[in-house]
Image (cartoon, rainbow, N blue to C red):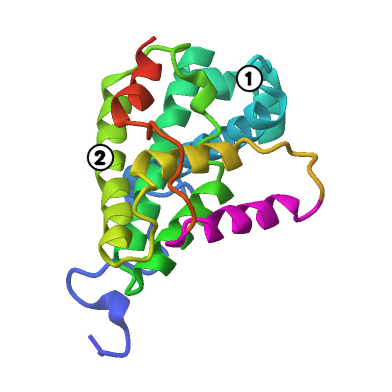
Amino acid sequence: MSQDNPAGTRGDAPPDRHDAAAGPPGIGRPHERRRGRQAEAARNDRLVLDAAREVFASQGFAAPVAAVAARAGVGMGTLYRRYGSKTELLQRLCVLAMTQASAAAEQALAADDPWVALTGYITERVGFRSGALAPLAGTIPVTDEMLAAARHGRRLHSRVVGRAHRAGVLRHDVTAVDIALLIEHFSRRAPDELTGSGDRLLAIAIAGLRPTDEPELPEPAPGWHAYEQRWHG
């Protein structure tokens, strides 16, 4: 046959013939449908987690799960299909926060300037309220996933702070735990604060991290053991 008629060449199907493996027209192949469902589930998951973080940060952890679903714009069925209980939701929220903190630390470690890296790391974590879940410590069971995420995040966090110390841009008596507590403090700021005041106060606090001739910080310095023991009751 003529090469101008590809539909007539050997082994080619006519252009209007539907591939049986794809199912009815407009539906797509099974693996494509699975990917679509997975993408939708991932979007809903993120909507729920973002909404939960905002709701609990503004209303406290006693806020009903219904408020989370309403803010996320999903039904209660969608929420409970993903999380069997409020505790599971909070545990997942903790893992997400620590994963985001680790990503911020990795980005900081890739920066050339140790001071810019440290301050950017602090600002970014405060921006997504990384430490807003600290009041949950001791109130929910710690899962293996939470523990692994916390250990990984601690190592990266300590590297960011240690790098700033070695470069001489961070006062020597500020510890990695001090930085973690600073992030927690500003993550829990009130949602109705004066416009811009949170950013201003954070900038003042960050400026105080620079090496100085001022007297040493009060002792004792906080340690990781007490910081982490809060989560184990």
Verify whether residue 208 appears in magenta.
yes
Quarter holding the C terminus? top left
Residue type at mark 1 is Met
Q: Is 1 placed left or right of 74 in the picture?
A: left
- In the rendered image, which residue does mark 1 sit on? 76
**Numbered disc 1: secondary structure:** helix
Earlier sequence position, callout 2 versus callout 1: 1
Label 2 to label 1, Cα distance in Å? 33 Å
Q: Amino acid at mark 2?
A: His
User: Which x, y percent locates residue 34?
Assistant: 37, 40
Q: Is residue 214 left or right of residue 21?
A: right
Region of the chain picked out in magenta, as a range: 195-213
Pick whichever, 213 or 93, lies toward us.
213
Q: Image point 48% across, 53% down: which residue?
A: 122
Q: Residue at x 34, y 18 (%)?
A: 229
Left-right relation of 136 to 60: left
Q: Which residue is mark 2?
A: 152
